[in-house]
Image (cartoon, rainbow, N blue to C red):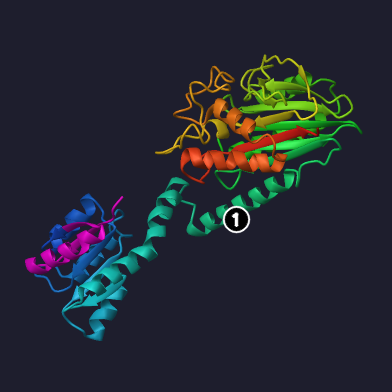
Amino acid sequence: MAETILVVDDDLDILELLKMNLEPEGYNVRTASDGDSAVQSACTDPPDLILLDVMMPHKNGFQVIEELKDIEETKSVPVILVTARGQTEDKVRGLDTGADDYITKPFDLREVTARVEAVLGRTRPIKYINPLMRAMGEGFSEKGLEQLAGHLQAAAAIQKKLLPEQAPSIDGFDIATLLQSSTSVSGDFYDFIPLSETQIGIVLGDVKGNGIPAALLMVMIRTALRLLCHEEDTPALILKRINDLVARDTEADLFATMIYGILDTETSTFTYSNGGHCYPLRWNTARNIDVLKTGGMLIGAFEEATFTTGTCLLAPGDILVFYTDGITETEAGDDPGSDENHGVSENSEQSDVYPDAIPTDTFYGGDRLAVCLSKNAALSASALCEAVVNDLALFSGSTQTPDDRALIVIKRDV
């Protein structure tokens, strides 16, 4: 949105000159020809900056500044004084009164533009910080905001340490992960929990929303899971107990989706339970993709939730992919590319992998992820994660992450 400048001068020619100079620079320019109308205009719709002439009849520039500084809505609006005098005492008086800068007539229009941009560059952060501080309460201050930023950084660092530093190294399997956060802290998470010499627990979850509330629930679920996975025999019972904990101790609108399963390297099976999460995909060497549709209810949304357990066999060369909806719900950009490169066409052999998926011309969708997986199946697990990231950027036209994204790729060696 263009910033607004209020130009105040009793010389109509100067008003027109400054307006003609500033509008091509992208500013909205309003004008006032005397002090009273300047104060009224500023109070009615506070501008982002005021260019204020000093020498005006009835009410001079110094008086206007003093009046504006006593009004809550205008006291933070920056002011550049414009004066025909070059006397030092006028400049000092203007700065003491509350002006942010001054320009001396006759002025160079290039200097006017430069000083306007310099003042706005210094005051823009205040424009956005002050409303935030007011929203957080009278006791909050700029120092408090800085402390909050520090707490966010600390929370992000703690959360990062809770995530595995790297995917586990397991004979016969190639495992890689991806986590991209839309904010400093994330609601998406994954974990690997050693259970025995041949079994490892794997979890991928997505807490509703993002930011600090989502991160706190993520830590709660992760902690409970690490305790319960050694007490219960089946993934379904573990999700049931986690659901009971979350439903009892959190608000009704705070919930999560997650998959927890056990990878058995001796039998090459993955036994899992799904708590309302995106269905995993399994690719095999016959170039077929199966959707693991064993499902269950959201974690924490209902006290009386039930879960079931499913098992899939991973043959040599098979690939198992878990993901969060931050991937499949990535929105298309203006030019998401051709179906030949990475999309899903009507005749694609994979187009029925996700018959209930969100339309692929609007969102990335499960079908498109399946096609990307199939086309890049020969890559390592880590390179396959990177291929998905690149395909998302191509589809959305951006490398930005509007929502948290998480991905786990497991490949069984041939």
- 42 with respect to 355 (left or right): left
Residue drawn 26% across and 54% down? Answer: 46
Position of 38 relative to 387 (above/below):
below
Residue 409 is inside the magenta segment: no
Figure disc tally: 1
Mark 1 surroundings within 10 Å by alpha-carbon count, few (fewer than 14), some (14 through 19), many (20 or more):
few
| Residue 373 image-quadrant placement | top right
**Residue farthest along the right direction in this orientation:** 197
Task: Determine if residue 224 is in view.
Answer: no
The residue shown at (15%, 70%) is 60
Q: Quadrant of the C terminus?
A: top right
Where is residue 366? Give x, y as percent.
57, 26
- The answer to which of 266 and 193 lies nearer the viewer is 266
Q: Is residue 290 visible?
A: yes
Foreground pick, 293 / 299: 293
Residue 11 percent across, percent down from the top left = 8, 69
Residue at the image point whose x is 67% and y is 23% from the top: 248
Q: Position of residue 49 (x, y in %)?
A: 27, 61
Place of residue 284 in the rendered image (x, y in percent of width and height, measured from the top left):
72, 25
Q: Quadrant of residue 111?
A: bottom left
Task: Please report the residue visible at 20 percent of the width from the left and 65 percent of the height from the top.
Answer: 64
Q: Secondary structure at mark 1?
A: helix
Is residue 357 placed above or below 342 in the rendered structure? above
Residue bearing the label numbered 1: 150
**Kind of residue at disc 1:** Gly
Question: Magenta part of the protein: which range?
Answer: 1-30
Q: Is residue 19 magenta?
A: yes
Q: Is residue 332 left or right of residue 240?
A: left
